[in-house]
Image (cartoon, helix red, strand yellow):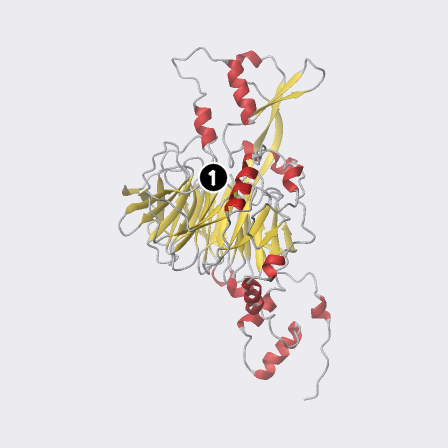
Amino acid sequence: MGTRSSSSAGGGETPGDSPEDSQNNLESRGLQNDDDEENVDLAQVLAYLLRRGQVRLVQGGGPASLHLVQSLSDSDDDNDSAWEGCLGDRYIPPVDSAPDTTSLDQNQIRTQTLLATGRQSTQRQHNITRLLLERERAGCGFTMGERCRVTSHFLPNHVCATDSYSQKAFCGVYSPNGSVFMSACQDQNIRLYDCRNGAFKKFRTVKARDVGWSVLDVAFTPDGGHFLYSSWSDYIHICNIYGDTESHTALDLSPSERRFAVFSLTVSSDGREILGGANDRCVYVYDREQNVRTLKIVSHEDDVNAVSFADDSCHIVYSGGDDALCKVWDRRTMREDDPKPVGILAGHQDGITFIHSKGDARYLLSNSKDQSIKLWDIRRFSGPEGLEASRRAVTQQNWDYRWQQVPKRALRKKRLPGDTSLMTYRGHGVLHTLIRCRFSPAYTTGQQFVYSGCSTGRVVVYDLLTGQIVKKLTNHKACVRDVSWHPCENKLVSSSPYCHLKSLPTTFKIPAFQNVPHCRTLPQNWDGNLRVWEHRQAEFYPEDLRTPPLESC
């Protein structure tokens, strides 16, 4: 344990490896031929590949004619083959036309949001023109709520800047003060953009070290002076943004797994502790002052895809995994020998891809492969009934979200018994990769919106209180994996991999099937795309067109 400095690029893993469900990788590696093993049971190999969904036999042209459709690799989630359908499919996520707001309407978050957006007043709600008139008459500025109410009418709707890479872009986040935007790409480069004074200009490209397949997650330190990144590696790396970018400090997590990756990464508000969720079912805590891993707890029954601190005190920690559960931990009582969460939130029917805290140690969002986002209040934990219902739902999932279409049964609007979530948001797709969702910023919107990437190439913005979609940003040609809203401006950046697909003949490597006609679809060209969105006046709201009554001076 400890740290090491690295000034040269490390060797990466093979491109077929991916960040999720590493058990598949371990099993498939066991099928590889060793030099001393010449006899292979081809029937068992084929049965295994069929069972794992890596090979499909499709009947065509008669009962004796079979077409073998081969996947590119045996990996999961963010591998090239997982994106084969990202352009070819036409999956349209169903929109919940009448979201159930019963629980949310009875919760304090409704009152908090109305106050934060200037809508709780008993006085008549004036339109924007009237607000401007009263501000000029009174000689004082808008209140916080009035400012948020005004800016909520000017949501991002137009692409004002773009950037493209030669490979897939996976992560993109603003720094805490919004002065820097950071993007991570599969080409092992981390790009930094200057966002001061309304600009979006790349000022530095940093070559990541010890990268296996791709950079999986990135995070800023609270002071905005350093950034961290993780990959298929035993180390989390930290690098200076404005100083020497050739020196990367590697923080050793000392995992017990041979194939190890940190999928989710975050830093405490004081910059001392680093929290990571990994493929070995564990949550890791690394202390930067002591330069040592201080905690490793088995937290979920499967991969940990998301971790987050609940607020600036960093006493409460959230985690989410492929077991469809959100767990709440008290950092002060976390013990390796007795890893017990203070509570569990159950209601999702499939694995959780991302978690975002509202920042008040009370509310959080979770995005899931069951094609929904849920809003939670940690004062309402789930009981045994909810835990059992969620576990049962997960075990009944027999489709692969990496390359298969969403089954109809997964789209049914059905609330599990014991589901304690306040609200469920539907209308975006979660396919191919770990798609992220977040609360909109408090400074400009009063956190009245929930926004998410989408497998159909959109950015979807929901109203927090009603569950209705208020904006769809459509400019990407493929899945939007990450989205980040500027903390002080009405600008939003979406990150998307984009692929050109071609159908090419290939040769299957198992001798028994060399004469079987088959084909596979290969993504020939990959481009990572960034889109910077801002508001451009293109539509008018009824209250903006309403002429206020004239008053005598």
Q: In front here: 421 or 538?
A: 421
- Residue sticking out furthest to the front: 384
- How many numbered marks does the figure carry? 1
Q: Please state the horizontal and vertical placement of residue 515, each as a whole percent of the image.
A: 60, 12
Compared with 490, 328 (above or below) is above
Q: Please state the horizontal and vertical placement of residue 126, each as a whole percent of the image.
A: 66, 74
Residue 171 in the figure: left or right of residue 5: right
Residue in the image at 55% along x and 55% along y: 492
Residue in the image at 55% along x and 24% along y: 51
Visible residue check, residue 482:
no
The quadrant of the picture occupied by the N terminus is: top left
Toward which corner of the image does residue 99 lie, by quadrant? bottom right
Compared with 397, 413 (above or below) is below
Residue in the image at 51% along x and 65% along y: 443
Q: Please state the horizontal and vertical placement of residue 134, each as a whole percent of the image.
A: 62, 80
- Residue sticking out furthest to the bottom: 553
Q: In front here: 488 or 286?
A: 286
Q: Residues within 10 Å of mark 1 (few under 14, many from 20)?
A: many
Which amino acid does the dot numbered 1 rest on? Gln
Residue 394 in the figure: left or right of residue 545: left
Q: Please state the horizontal and vertical placement of residue 302, each as a whole percent of the image.
A: 46, 37
The quadrant of the picture occupied by the C terminus is: bottom right
State the residue position of label 1: 186
User: In the structure shown, which secondary structural element does the residue marked by tag 1 occupy?
Assistant: loop
Visible residue check, residue 7:
yes
